[in-house]
């Protein structure tokens, strides 16, 4: 039964916890039942949580938002990965490449899900690994979408490792190039055997939500194969953008505002 005495903070925290702990994205009714709230009450609280970035609505499902992902890697690896998994599997099947999903953390990106074809079993999948921006395509694609101030902690890691920031081969030039093209490519530089290509999935406001990365033998990241991989990766990132940011359908159980106006006989 819905609880009659619960503060607004309690309700919000209960819903954030329910979303974060779920092993899959939940619908409004499932969340309301899980925390013991009326559907209309849960809906109103979720609206505020979505607005503040703690929860993200994807169609009829709710999953951890950008703020929650920053404080809870476990929530990201369960809910975001579950929602993106079909697209990753389709991309791996289409390209015969390993595909991973990454999110930004404080100063690196982290791999939260991987689909690895049998032919690439010899390549480490880097699942749960934190990756620096100066060595991998995934964090490069993500950090390229940040503003100058937000890039600072990621650049500091590269600088501490002795990687140049300025000049034609510097990291800042790489970030500008990725932001212009939409693709980050690691080919024949940091690893002469393994290549990768990544593209960020970006929220309507411009914040990077995640990055999808193709990984495989470095020799396969050359033309004309590179263009084919780019098209497949662009299709996958578009599909994820729709999945993660498309407006939700009208909820028939959601409360409506009364129409104020002159009545007619």
Image (spheres, rainbow, N blue to C red):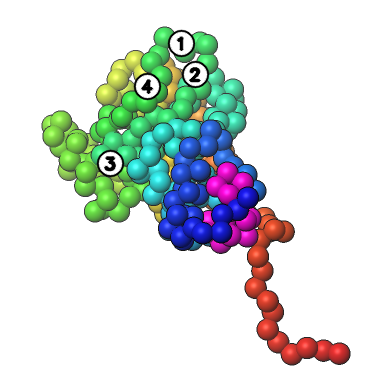
Measured in 3D between alpha carbons, the distance from the residue under mark 4 to the one under mark 1, in whole angstroms, is 12 Å
**Measured along the vertical axis of the image, is residue 222 above or below residue 39?**
above
SS type, badge 1: loop
**Measured along the vertical axis of the image, is residue 41 above or below residue 107?**
below
Q: Which residue is mark 2?
A: 116
The residue located at (43%, 40%) in the rendering is: 210
Q: Earlier in the sequence, mark 4 or mark 1?
A: 1
Q: For the C terminus, which image quadrant? A: bottom right
Q: Which residues are magenta?
A: 31-46
Q: Which residue is mark 3?
A: 106
- Crowding at dot 4, Cα within 10 Å, few <14 / some 14-19 / many 20+, comes out as some
Q: Earlier in the sequence, mark 2 or mark 1?
A: 2
The answer to whether marks 2 and 1 mark residues whose Cβ atoms lie closer than 8 Å is yes
Measured in 3D between alpha carbons, the distance from the residue under mark 3 to the one under mark 4, in whole angstroms, is 18 Å
Q: Which residue is mark 1?
A: 121
Measured in 3D between alpha carbons, the distance from the residue under mark 2 to the one under mark 1, in whole angstroms, is 7 Å
The residue located at (55%, 47%) in the rendering is: 35
Q: Earlier in the sequence, mark 1 or mark 3?
A: 3
Please say whether residue 56 is visible from this viewpoint: yes
Q: Which mark is residue 126?
A: 4
């Amino acid at each position: 039964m819905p609880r009659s005495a619960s503060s607004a903070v309690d309700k919000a925290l209960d819903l954030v916890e329910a979303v974060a702990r779920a092993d899959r994205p939940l619908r409004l009714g499932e969340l309301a039942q899980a925390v013991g709230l009326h559907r209309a009450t849960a809906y109103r609280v979720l609206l505020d949580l979505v607005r503040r970035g703690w929860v993200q609505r994807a169609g009829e499902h709710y999953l951890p938002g950008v703020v929650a992902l920053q404080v809870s890697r476990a929530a990201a690896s369960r809910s975001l990965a579950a929602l993106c998994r079909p697209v990753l599997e389709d991309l791996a099947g289409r390209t015969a490449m390993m595909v991973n999903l990454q999110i930004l953390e404080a100063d690196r990106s982290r791999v939260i899900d991987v689909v690895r074809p049998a032919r690439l079993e010899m390549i480490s999948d880097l699942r749960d690994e934190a990756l620096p921006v100066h060595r991998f395509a995934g964090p490069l694609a993500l950090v390229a979408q940040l503003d100058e101030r937000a890039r600072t902690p990621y650049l500091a890691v590269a600088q501490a490792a002795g990687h140049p920031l300025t000049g034609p081969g510097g990291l800042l030039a790489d970030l500008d190039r990725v932001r212009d093209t939409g693709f980050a490519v690691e080919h024949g530089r940091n690893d002469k055997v393994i290549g990768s290509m990544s593209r960020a999935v970006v929220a309507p406001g411009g914040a990077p939500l995640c990055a999808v990365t193709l990984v495989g033998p470095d020799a396969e990241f050359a033309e004309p194969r590179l263009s084919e991989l780019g098209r497949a990766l662009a299709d996958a990132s578009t599909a994820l953008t729709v999945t993660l940011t498309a407006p939700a359908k009208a909820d028939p159980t959601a409360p409506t505002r009364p129409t104020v106006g002159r009545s007619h006989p």
